Image (cartoon, grey):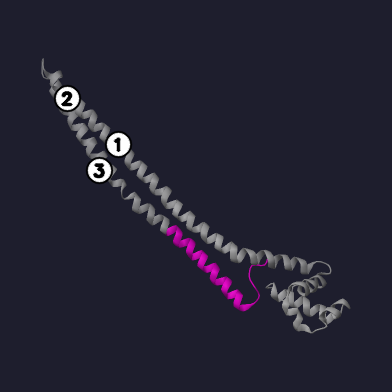
Amino acid sequence: MVLYDARPVRLVGQIVLDLVVVAGIVVAVLLGRAVTASISGLAGIGTRVHDQGSAFHEQLSRAATAIGRIPFAGKAVSRPLRDASRSAASIAAAGRQQHDETIRLAHQVGTGVAVVVILLLVLVWLRYRGGFIRSASAARRLDRRPGGEELMALRALVTRDRAAGLGPDVVERWRQQDPETVRALADLERRSSGLLRATRR
């Protein structure tokens, strides 16, 4: 697998792109965590509602129990307090639910933001780096096959405009299998594919 272009200018560009993508992934993770923390802060409202509702529930429950001990009228008088105590318990439960749902939402949104940004970065990387890796690796495999140099020369002759720079009779010399022409065309294809000249072993 060929990861980087042998041409210095393009090599620098590829390295810069890789570093930008890696840095972008780190920033995406940090951004996701920041979003999670920001939304999680709203869970404090539910926590306070739960705590205050629980405390009010306990106070009303104790008061209802104490009043219920009063002879004759105790149960009748304590009934509204017990109803209020149950309502306070319901409010406390709602506060707990709001807290839990807010935390869940915070993690989902934070993770979603990070994943979307990372996917965009990966798509950009695949667009500009994946294409080169595939084409350069395919060219190197072709070059290393038996008769690879001749195949690379033919590929340069067909696809590279710069092949005309080797002379007006380059096609005729290639047809006659002139070694220098074949080598020059193969080297042109290697350079155009981002490979080093000495790729064959």
Q: Would you identify the image quadrant in which residue 13 lies?
A: bottom right
**Label 2 amino acid?**
Pro
* Element marked by disc 2: helix
The magenta segment: 1-30
Asked if residue 144 lies left or right of residue 71, the reply is: right
Residue for badge 1: 94
Name the residue furthest right.
Answer: 176
Name the residue furthest front.
Answer: 168
Q: Sequence-wise, which precedes: disc 3 or disc 2? A: 3
| Tags 1 and 2 touching, CB below 8 Å | no
The mark found on residue 48 in the picture is 3
The answer to whether residue 165 is magenta is no
Q: CA distance from mark 3 to mark 2?
A: 25 Å
Residue for badge 2: 80
Residue at 72%, 79% (x, y): give it. Answer: 162
Number of other residues with Cα within 10 Å of mark 3, as a class: few under 14, some 14 to 19, many 20 or more: some
Q: Would you identify the image quadrant in which residue 29 lies?
A: bottom left
Number of other residues with Cα within 10 Å of mark 2, as a class: few under 14, some 14 to 19, many 20 or more: few
**Label 3 amino acid?**
Arg
Q: Position of residue 111 (x, y in %)?
A: 45, 51
The answer to whether residue 14 is magenta is yes
The quadrant in which the N terminus is found is: bottom right
| Tags 1 and 3 touching, CB below 8 Å | no
Residue at 52%, 61% (x, y): give it. Answer: 121
